[in-house]
Image (tube, grey):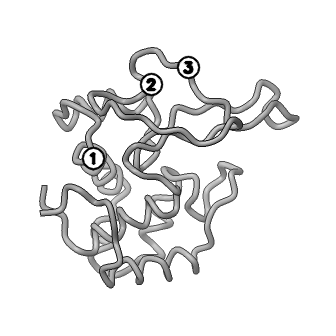
């Protein structure tokens, strides 16, 4: 997979914003966890979702998640993207391919290439809960912080992106 510097920095920005690595499982009330089997999504084999928020008025039954990997992909999106992209595993390269497809679907690749990072972040804020401007109620980063971090990442201070050529 050929990923240019701006796309690579945006992928790194997502990972930074989500606080995730390729082996991260969503942090639940019992703390963080990781996985080691990249053959499929960690929840694809019947593992129960993780409780991420105790029951409260807004979430009477609590809030559960299956978000996993560097881009915190939910299990419900794994199979459609696996099929669409012809993926055979949940490896770092597959995770990168899915994130790039999600960015493409939001028509943000052109925005990234043109340097319109504020619009690219806004275009993708319905995918990643840590992005500013969504309505997931999970907090999130400020746009100013995201733009500043993107510039740092674009300067080459990136890490853990495995599929760049």
User: Camera-side residue: 19 or 125?
Assistant: 19
Q: Given contact means CB atoms under 8 Å apart, are the residues at marks 1 and 3 in contact?
A: no
Q: Secondary structure at mark 1?
A: helix
The quarter of the picture where the N terminus appears is: bottom left
Disc on res. 17: none
Q: Earlier in the sequence, mark 1 or mark 3?
A: 3
Which residue appears at 29% of the width and 36% of the height? 90
Q: Secondary structure at mark 3?
A: loop
Left or right: where does residue 51 sit relative to residue 13? Answer: right
Q: Is residue 106 above or below residue 77?
A: below
Q: Secondary structure at mark 2?
A: loop
Q: Earlier in the sequence, mark 2 or mark 1?
A: 2
User: Camera-side residue: 148 or 104?
Assistant: 148
Give the residue furthest to the top: 46
Left or right: where does residue 83 sit relative to residue 134? Answer: left
Q: Is residue 39 above or below residue 152?
A: above
Crowding near pointer 2: few (<14 within 10 Å), some, many (20+)? some
Left or right: where does residue 61 sit relative to residue 142? Answer: right
Which residue appears at 61% of the width and 63% of the height? 133
Please tell me in which quadrant of the rendered image residue 150 appears. Answer: bottom left
Which residue appears at 49% of the width and 19% of the height? 47
Label 1 sits on residue: 92
Label 3 sits on residue: 48
Give the residue furthest to the right: 57
Disc on res. 43: 2
Q: Earlier in the sequence, mark 2 or mark 3?
A: 2
């Amino acid at each position: 997979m050929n990923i240019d510097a701006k796309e690579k920095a945006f992928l790194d920005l997502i990972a930074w914003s989500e606080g995730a690595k390729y082996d991260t499982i969503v942090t639940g009330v019992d703390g963080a966890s990781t996985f080691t089997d990249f053959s499929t999504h960690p929840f694809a084999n019947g593992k129960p979702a993780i409780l991420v928020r105790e029951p409260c008025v807004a979430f009477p039954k609590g809030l559960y998640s299956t978000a996993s990997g560097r881009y915190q992909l939910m299990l419900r999106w794994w199979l459609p993207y696996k099929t669409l992209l012809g993926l055979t595993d949940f490896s770092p390269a597959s995770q990168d391919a899915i994130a790039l497809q999600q960015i493409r679907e939001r028509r943000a690749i052109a925005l990234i290439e043109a340097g319109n990072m504020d619009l690219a972040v806004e275009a993708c804020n319905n995918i990643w809960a840590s992005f500013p401007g969504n309505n997931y109620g999970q907090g999130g980063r400020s746009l100013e912080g995201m733009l500043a971090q993107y510039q740092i990442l674009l300067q080459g201070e990136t890490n853990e992106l495995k599929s760049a050529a």
